[in-house]
Amino acid sequence: MSEDNYMNFSLTVLPGIEDIAQKEFEKKWSLINSASLPEIQRKKGKLFITSDISDFCSLIPYLRIPTDAYLIIDEFVAKDRPKIFNKVAKIPWHNFLRGDFPLVIVTTKESKLINSSSVKQSVESGLKDALKKSPIKKVPKSAEPITNKLHIDLYQDRLRISLSLCGSRMDKRGVKLYTDTAPLRESIAAAMLFTLSELAPNQKLLDPMAGTGTFGLESILYNKYNEYRSFDYQLAPFFINLPLRKRVKIEQGLFTSITLHDLSPKAIESIKYNFKDFLESVEEISVQDFFKLAKSNATVAILNPPYGKRIKLEEELNIFIERIITHSKNTLELEKLAMVFPAWAFHKLRDLKISEKRFFSNGGIDVVFVIIDLL
């Protein structure tokens, strides 16, 4: 492959699960690309990769744990606004952009230029100057519009210009339409499912408090090409002239079967609507009180139980969690139980055999993701 096709990229990841995202990237790279795995630099909330354009972009529709993917267009020391203007004005934007003038998002930290508004003004002025000389092409009328999001990160006087390759976030799958009162971000669900499947491969999955089916849907879609939405890179000038790649069909799934229950009939109706194209991939969808469930064919379970915030509980959360663990172990005789819930409740639990433990933030709430060994 031509060295001209090698560029710098980054993936944005929820802080706290960067290593899980890296494992996903490495595993799917080996399944989809024939080229050697590139070196991955891991930082808080980011993975940095230098790769062939086709190899990297072809992976984007298969990735489930990152929330965005970027092409790093330039990076340089920036201590004054004229330098930013001149640098931006010299970039051949017609090679990167198509459609409308880009949305410029600026963050500054620990730098001489700390005013993000003034930095944004310099970047936009440089862009306008460059586009006067080399205008960008319009998007075909038959295609979906391109967002053209430019992220300008100025940290310790070093400025990085990154172009979003996705448009809307990657965890916006384009599939699930009905949601509930306490949704879990799809990228977190994917990370939990992948980790559970790595610790307990070839198991039957139960989600007994399914809400509108995020866990089930993510487990079905995890290894599939996402054909339900578009990504900005697909019409970008630097990508569109490259040879087309055939889609790779990944045969293996995360679990051998999926069973979904919820106490709410309304939630079950939403699940059936969200799963209308995937019903053949599910063993059972039914209204069921978890604590009245006397048996299950499943061997592992995953839950996002109500926290007592948006959905009220009649008991303390930690006591509710203890009841879930006891029922999963003693009545259902499950092997492993994966859950996500507020971190404060975890610190009140005792005598647990933990296979995996992660602390992070979900919707502004400090939560913990745990996998409990019940054997």
Image (cartoon, helix red, strand yellow):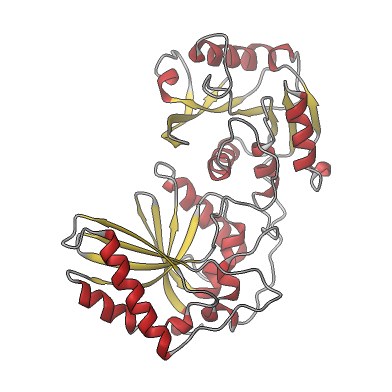
Place of residue 125 in the rendered image (x, y in percent of width and height, measured from the top left): 33, 76
In-front residue for pair 320/104 = 104
Q: Identify the residue at horizontal 45%, vertical 64% (top origin).
A: 70
Is residue 324 toward the left or the right of residue 81 in the image?
right
For residue 332, what is the image quadrant?
top right
Q: Residue furthest right?
A: 280
Q: Is residue 328 left or right of residue 5?
A: right
Viewer-proximal residue, 244 or 132? Answer: 132
Question: Would you say 21 lies left or right of 194 here?
Answer: left
- Tell me which corner region of the image, top left, top right, bottom left or bottom right, holds residue 72: bottom left
Please state which of residues 111 and 259 is positioned toward the viewer in this rendering: 111
Image coordinates for residue 274, horizontal then vertical, percent: 75, 42
**Number of marks drawn:** 0
Can residue 323 be seen in this snapshot?
A: yes
Please determine whether, in this image, residue 285 is positioned above or below residue 97: above
Quarter of the image with the C terminus in it:
top right
Q: Residue 214, how many percent across, how many down? A: 65, 38
238 vs 327, nearest the viewer: 238
Would you say 171 lies left or right of 357 here?
A: right
Residue 34 seen in render: no
Vertical order, 85 against 287 (above or below): below
Residue at horizontal 29%, vertical 72%? 122
Placement of 374 over or under 236, stated as above or below: above
Residue 255 in percent (x, y) is at 69, 40
Q: Is residue 236 above or below residue 249?
A: below
